[in-house]
Amino acid sequence: MAVTAQLVKELRERTGAGMMECKKALVAVEGNIEKAIDAMRKAGQAKADKKALRTAADGAIVAKEGNGKAVLVEINCETDFVARDDSFKAFSNDVAEVVLTSGKTEKADIDALALASGETVAEACKNLINKIGEKIEVRRATISKSSDHVGTYSHGGRIAVLVEMNGGSAELARDIAMHIAASNPLVISGSDVPADVVAKEKEIFVAQAKDSGKPDNIIEKMVEGRIRKFLDEQSLEGQAFVKDPNQKVGALLQENNAKVASFTRFAVGEGIEKEESNFAEEVMSQVRGV
């Protein structure tokens, strides 16, 4: 695979490493970005993967609660200017309301829902596009299932979380949702982290520890400690609670006889690529000049 400017840019964003290090790493593995990240981390050149932090599309996420249920709905547009537009905000809120009432979360089903205006979501969306002049679409939605409590938290409409909790209280469920928005755990418990993810991290930790020159038995203890820390960082229950860093979330839940059944965290535009040709051209011009 050819090493393109876009690949160099993505690797740079995901690792925090310099442009030349990224180019050399990609050349060494024939453009395989995942192999390049592993190699750079083993060599100590790369920071943790930042891919999850990237957002490449605009819009808003609406969190709404009612009648013991809660929903998250993401509506996308092209620019933050439109995301702040009152008409766009009103449309997004109306869509979230009918999703909450209907329980429908598939895009095709949502498009067919009727709004209070009498228009379907698809018709209202088309009219808004004609008015504003940007592409607008309902991207995704989720709704809570059966649980004792549901809690939502929205951070400026850019990140939103829905938590389902057994035991505890509605206030605690909201606090946990706020924590998840800030700390972005991968799973609820450390035991839920996929085995292949743990194995991959262990391989990287071993490679890093061997460079220390310490005996194998010390290296093994070092790696075990780093794996425990990794599992805590990735799991909700293992993380320090944002409102009280001296207490882990797992201990807080136990103290309140609560258990998180599930959580969903949406960030605006995550996983959507936006073309940035000017930056790519700038990077490539520098690569060619080396």
Image (tube, helix red, strand yellow):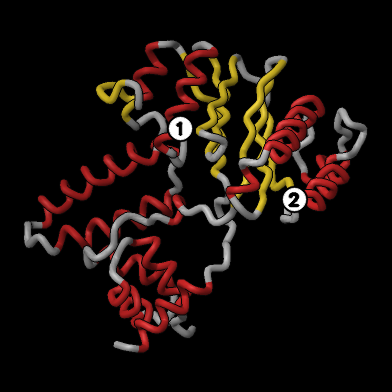
> Looking at the image, do the residues carrying marks 2 and 1 touch, with CB atoms under 8 Å apart?
no
Q: Calculate the distance from the C-alpha at mark 2 to the C-alpha at mark 1.
A: 34 Å
* Label ID, residue 86: none
Q: Could you say which is closer to the camera, residue 262 or residue 26?
A: 26
Which quadrant of the figure contains the C terminus? bottom left
| Image x and y of residue 232, in percent | 33, 37
Q: Is residue 244 left or right of residue 167?
A: left
Q: Is residue 197 left or right of residue 18?
A: right
Q: Secondary structure at mark 2?
A: helix
The residue at 49%/27% (across/down) is: 177
> Which quarter of the picture shows residue 40?
bottom left
Q: Is residue 85 above or below residue 9?
A: above
| Image x and y of residue 158, in percent | 54, 40
Q: Is residue 75 left or right of residue 171?
A: right
Numbered disc in front, either 2 or 1: 2
Q: Which residue is mark 2?
A: 132
Question: Three-letter amino acid code at disc 2?
Answer: Ile
> Which quarter of the picture shows residue 200?
bottom left
The residue at 7%/57% (across/down) is: 215
* Label ID, residue 180: 1
